[in-house]
Amino acid sequence: MATEPEREPTFEERLSELETAVRALESGEEALDRSLEIYEQAVGHLKACHEMLGRAEEKVRILSGDGEVDFDPEGGK
């Protein structure tokens, strides 16, 4: 029986994992080796989130049609 390929975590799942890693590292309760493992995983999540945001930004640029995107949450106020 063929196994299904592992699905890619969503942005929200990766962000949650990143937040969990930050809390664990900030607590200072983990051993050095475990802290390094957590840090390595967190860097991977951070890079993936950055890539996902870049793709989303590009998609917004394409959909806006002008190539310029204003990400000001205040709407320029």
Image (cartoon, rainbow, N blue to C red):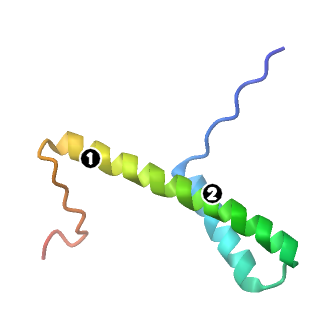
Q: How many marks?
A: 2
What is the C-alpha distance between the residues marked 1 and 2? 25 Å
Amino acid type shown at disc 2:
Gly
Residue 71 appears left or right of 24: left
Badge 1: residue crowd in 10 Å (few <14, some 14–19, many ≥20): some
Residue picked out by circle 1: 60
Q: Which quadrant, please, contains the N terminus?
A: top right
Residue drawn at (79%, 17%) of the image: 2
**N-term mark: 1 or 2:** 2
Position above or below: 2 against 29: above
Tell me the number on the disc at residue 45.
Answer: none
**In the rendered image, which residue does mark 2 sit on?**
44
What amino acid type is highlighted by mark number 1?
A: Val
Asked whether, in this view, residue 44 is left or right of residue 72, the answer is right
Q: Residue at x 70, y 83 (%)?
A: 26
Return the residue nearer the eye: 74 or 14: 14
Q: Residue 71 appears in which quarter of the rendering?
A: bottom left
Outermost residue on the top side: it is: 1
Front-lying residue, 75 or 14: 14
At label 2, counting other C-alpha atoms closer than 10 Å, the crowd grade (few under 14, some 14-19, many 20 or more) is: some
